[in-house]
Amino acid sequence: MTTTSPDTTTASPASSAHRHRATAPPAHRITLARVIRAEWIKLRTLRSTWVMLAAVLLTVVGLGAIAAASTTGAVEGPPDGGGPGGGDPLSTVLSGSMLAVVLVGVLGVLIGAREYSSGVIRSYLAAVPARLPVLWAKVIAFLAAVLPVVLAGVLVAFTVGMAVLDAGGVPTVSWTDPGTARVVLGTAGYVVGMGLIGLALGMILRSTAGAISALLAGVLVLPTLAGALLPDSWDGMLKYLPSNAASAFTSTVPTDSLLGTGAGAAVFALWVVVALAGAAVALTRRDA
């Protein structure tokens, strides 16, 4: 009698698991670079982002050119002959930055608060449990989108505005004149910094309407209102409000009511840091 032995063997569970691990796709770690890439994709694929950035650019350049033309008399200006810049060439050509601050601030609020209103933030934080990379990714994506536009806007506004003033026979300043580069670049930094404060307020308050109201009323309107209503003894404290601190490095003529240039820049930067720190605490300490 002959016997045959099977020439096949049954695979052990251990070997099957090993083959499964070998063929399974590698798991992707959540890194800051990947979160930044995801945030950038979200930001650039929204049509509203590009509409807002275009509005910022047109506002800075267009209003500056109109203000310069109004100063030269090429277009009809105010009855008293005054212009938006109060006769100062730099203030005139950069007058569009006053509205750009509002637009960029609102964009920052939308980036910070939009996902809370839609509820998407829950799945976002479930995918990125460390949470803080979400904030840094939003900040970096915001800067990547806004900073080049604002910087290009103020530089073009300066070039075009000075050309309009020169053609109309109005005194101008050049880039090499003392304080010119500081005011132009400082204006860009002020606009972008207010956008970062808006982003932080959006993440702290988790409400688009509430954050926009806080930004406009508390940061932009309050300094003017407080200066008009409070006694002169409060002027020393009002210097440290964000917009007043920014005026120290965006004004061509320093005054006693403002901080020094370096001190103003440091105080404004501190406001931005404090706002982002508050957003970091709110993001990590509170439930979504």
Image (cartoon, rainbow, N blue to C red):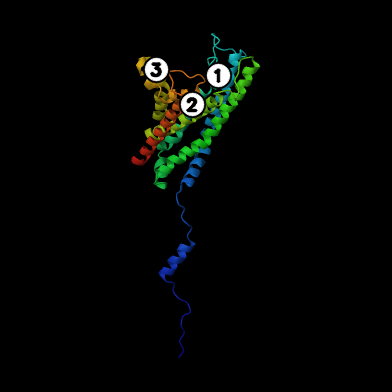
- Residues under numbered marks 2 and 1 in contact, where contact means CB atoms less than 8 Å apart: no
Say which of marks 3 and 2 sits in front.
3
Image quadrant occupied by the C terminus: top left
- Residues under numbered marks 1 and 3 in contact, where contact means CB atoms less than 8 Å apart: no
> Horizontally, is 83 left or right of 132 in the view?
right
Spatial CA distance of label 3 from label 2 is 20 Å
Could you say whether the residue bearing mark 1 is in a helix, strand or loop?
helix
Which numbered circle lies on residue 250? none
Q: Quadrant of residue 170?
A: top right
- Label 3: which residue? 227
Q: What amino acid is found at the position of numbered circle 3 in the picture?
A: Gly
Is residue 60 shown above or below 78?
Answer: below
Judging depth in this view, the residue of 182 and 13 nearest the camera is 182
- Label 2: which residue? 101
Say which of marks 2 and 1 sits in front.
1
N-term mark: 2 or 1: 1
Q: Quadrant of residue 224?
A: top left
Say few, some or many: other residues with alpha carbon within 10 Å of mark 3 (under 14 / 14 to 19 / 20 or more).
Answer: some
Is residue 207 shown above or below 165?
Answer: below
N-term mark: 3 or 2: 2
- Residue 2 rendering spot, x and y as whole percentages: 46, 89
Say few, some or many: other residues with alpha carbon within 10 Å of mark 2 (under 14 / 14 to 19 / 20 or more).
Answer: many
- Residue 39 rendering spot, x and y as whole percentages: 48, 41
Judging depth in this view, the residue of 140 and 10 nearest the camera is 140
Please identify the residue farthest to the bottom as the structure is shown. 1
Q: What amino acid is found at the position of numbered circle 2 in the picture?
A: Val
Asked whether the viewer can see residue 46, the reply is no
**Image point 56% across, 24% down: which residue?**
180
- Label 1: which residue? 92
> Horizontally, is 157 left or right of 233 in the view?
right
Judging depth in this view, the residue of 240 and 263 nearest the camera is 263
- Residue 254 rendering spot, x and y as whole percentages: 48, 19
